[in-house]
Every structure is written in C-alpha cells, then in structure tokens.
Image: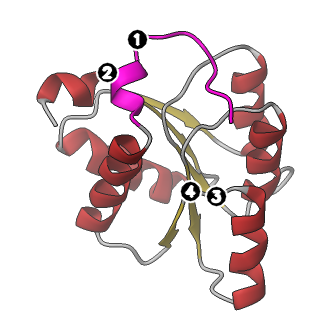
C-alpha cells in the first residue's frame, strides 16, 4: 500500500468517548491516513451517510447513547452499502458477536487494542474490499 493509497482512503471514526476517538485518529494519522472524519455518536454518523458522505471503512464503537454501533451498521446495510465496518467493543459474548456478524460487521476490535492492531485491521479491510481501487468513485457499492 502506497502513501497515496493512505491519503485517498476515507475513514469515519464513530466514538462517543473523546479520549478514545482522539486516540484512534492519532494512531491512523501517525501512519499516513489523512482523510479522517469523526462523529460523536451513532446519530451524527448516520446523518453523514444520509447527507451523502462516502466512507471506505467505518470504525465504530458498539455502546453509545442514542444510536449504538449495531444500529448504525443496520442502517448502513439497509441502505445496501457494503462499506467495511469495524466494530470496537468491550463485548465478547458469543451471542453479542453472533448478532454483530448477522448484521454484517466486517471486523471486531477489542477496546483494549494495541495501535498496531488497529492499523492492521484497517489495512486488511481496505485491501480485502478493494476499496482503494474504487476510492475515487462516488458510487455506493452494493451486494
């Protein structure tokens, strides 16, 4: 992956905790991602999609007030968008993970992740979805 690929990828970070949101943005920025957008909660994130903003992956907290991460994911999938979705969570029960997979989550990250784990997961979902090949297109990818 080239530096140009990193600057083209459009990443939405959805996290209600200021410290965690800043931490994620700082990690991604430190490796060269420059097109980073944040949302303070699921409602704000969904508004961005409703307004037509395009993102390559979404990194989203699961537990948030108003609209949680699974609701954001459901809305995105219901709009037929096949955007990679990384769910950040402290939940690790089998039932919780199954519900997330059933809704179409692409990947999970524990809230106790190390910076290299975050970067590796973002790079993986970007390369698996061929997002970087299509990042200049304004279309919504469908299933």
Quadrant location, the N terminus: top left
The reply, left or right, for residue 58 in relation to residue 74 is left
- Marks 1 and 4, how far apart in space? 22 Å
- Marks 3 and 4, how far apart in space? 4 Å
Q: Which residues are magenta?
A: 130-143
| Residue 9 can be seen, yes or no | no
- Report the disc number at residue 106: 4
Q: Residue 17 or 75: which is nearer the viewer?
A: 75
Residues tagged 2 and 1 counted as in contact (Cβ below 8 A): yes
For mark 2, give the secondary structure. helix
Residues tagged 3 and 4 counted as in contact (Cβ below 8 A): yes
- Marks 2 and 4, how far apart in space? 20 Å
Residue 93 picture location, percent across and down: 69, 90
| Residue 104 can be seen, yes or no | yes
Residues tagged 3 and 1 counted as in contact (Cβ below 8 A): no
Q: Quadrant of residue 104?
A: bottom right
**Label 2 vs 4, first from the N-terminus:** 2
For mark 1, give the secondary structure. loop
Mark 1 Cα shell of 10 Å, populated few (<14), some (14-19), many (≥20)? few
Mark 4 Cα shell of 10 Å, populated few (<14), some (14-19), many (≥20)? some
Residue 90 picture location, percent across and down: 60, 79
Q: Which residue is mark 1?
A: 136
Residues tagged 3 and 2 counted as in contact (Cβ below 8 A): no
Q: Which residue is mark 2?
A: 8
Foreground: disc 2 or disc 1? 1
For mark 3, give the secondary structure. loop
- Marks 3 and 2, how far apart in space? 23 Å
Q: Which residue is mark 3?
A: 105
Foreground: disc 2 or disc 4? 4
**Label 3 vs 2, first from the N-terminus:** 2
Most common secondary structure along the magenta stretch: loop
């Amino acid at each position: 992956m080239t530096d140009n690929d990193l600057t083209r990828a459009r990443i939405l970070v959805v996290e209600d905790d200021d410290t965690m949101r800043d931490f994620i943005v700082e990690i991604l920025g430190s490796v060269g991602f420059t097109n980073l957008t944040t949302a303070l909660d699921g409602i704000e994130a969904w508004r961005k999609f409703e307004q037509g903003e395009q993102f390559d992956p979404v990194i989203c907290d699961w537990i948030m007030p108003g609209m949680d991460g699974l609701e954001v994911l459901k809305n995105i999938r219901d709009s037929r968008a096949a955007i990679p979705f990384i769910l950040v969570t402290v939940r690790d029960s089998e039932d919780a993970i199954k519900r997330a997979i059933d809704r179409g989550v692409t990947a999970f990250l524990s809230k106790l992740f190390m910076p290299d784990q975050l970067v590796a997961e973002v790079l993986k979902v970007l390369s698996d979805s061929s997002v970087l090949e299509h990042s200049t297109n304004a279309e919504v990818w469908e299933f």
